[in-house]
Image (cartoon, rainbow, N blue to C red):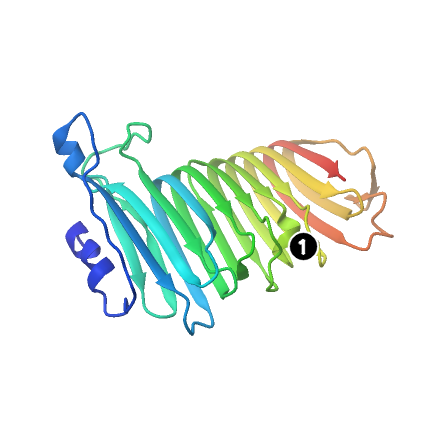
Amino acid sequence: MNARRRRSRMTRHPGLSIAILVALTALPSPAPVAAQEMKSVTISRALTTEKALDVVVTFGAGELLLRRADRGTLYALDLRYDERAFVPLADFDGHRLEVGLETHDRQGNLDLDDGRSGRLDLRLAPDVPMDLRLKFGAGRSTIDLGGLALRDLDIETGASESELDVSRPNSQVLRRAQLDVGAAEFTALRLGNLNLERLDVTLGVGDLTLDFSGALERDIEVTIDMGLGSLELRLPEAVGLRLEKSSFLTSFDTEGFERRDGVYYSSNWDDASRRIDVTIDAAFGSIRIVRTP
């Protein structure tokens, strides 16, 4: 589908029976031709009778912001993009929302620092049960899931610098979350607020930080498949940790752990009211355990 047809979906799709403000404006630039190709789009929809929402975000490159919307808003978004480098997407059919910026190959490699990189600021309803799938390519992302009612979560990143925070507790039970991290620096904060049962993480190359502070309501099972990189696990002092690792050349400080049948148990494992069970398959790198108050 070409760029012109995709842009038309934002204003003429039959499912978009919503109040939409679309502003396409030329942004100042030293090069007049480039300025004519910079576009901005703003879209919002008020919350009505929606009982659930399936959200798919596809973002090729640039800066991504995701957070909760104001009460009474189902979703709101601001897009800024260069039409030479990106194809915008915004499609809602009453149950499923698809938004994002996809790159096309007209200009070859995209320089994220040349002022033409895309930007998406997406806000989602805080009280609507939601399945969220996010695919992010290159650039920087700041994601705050605090206050969202998440039932399913799947995040995939490429060559990026990403920070995920869960600043408020999730009102839904999240049976499983999946993080697929490419060549990246990825930090996930306050995962205890996700109301999570299972977390599956894949790390290609990079640095990964998983912080399990927050309102930890249940035990969590975690699997981590790590190629080349460093892993930091941050856990509250009162939480018990069981760690099983299969690795080639991966360092791990075992101080404060007891080894039983090749598996490491924290000293408080048997008596802890909340426990995190971690299985790691790693090639090269390091594993660091940090205890937090």
The relative height of residue 95 versus residue 293 in the rendered view (above or below) is below
Q: Position of residue 122 (x, y in %)?
A: 40, 51
Quadrant where the C terminus lies? top right
Q: Toward which corner of the image does residue 95 lie, by quadrant?
A: bottom left
Count up the numbered dots. 1
- At x 20%, y 47%, the residue is 24
Q: Could you say whether the residue bearing mark 1 is in a helix, strand or loop?
A: strand
Q: Nearer the viewer, residue 232 or 191?
A: 191
Question: Would you call the spot at circle 1 few (<14 residues within 10 Å), some (14-19), or many (20 or more)?
Answer: some
Tell me: residue 80, above or below residue 171: above
Residue at label 1?
A: 221
Q: Residue at x 38, y 42 (%)?
A: 137
Nearest the eye: 178 or 62: 62
Q: Is residue 158 left or right of residue 269?
A: left
Q: Residue at x 68, y 46 (%)?
A: 213
78 with respect to 262 (left or right) = left
Tell me residue 18's x, y (percent): 30, 66
Residue 149 appears at what percent x and percent y?
54, 62
Between 136 and 28, the one lying in front of the other is 28
| Quarter in which the N terminus is drawn | bottom left
Which three-letter amino acid code belongs to the residue tagged 1? Glu
**Spot occupied by residue 168 in the image (x, y as percentages of width and height):** 60, 52
Classify residue 72 by image quadrant.
bottom left
Find the residue positioned furthest to the top: 30
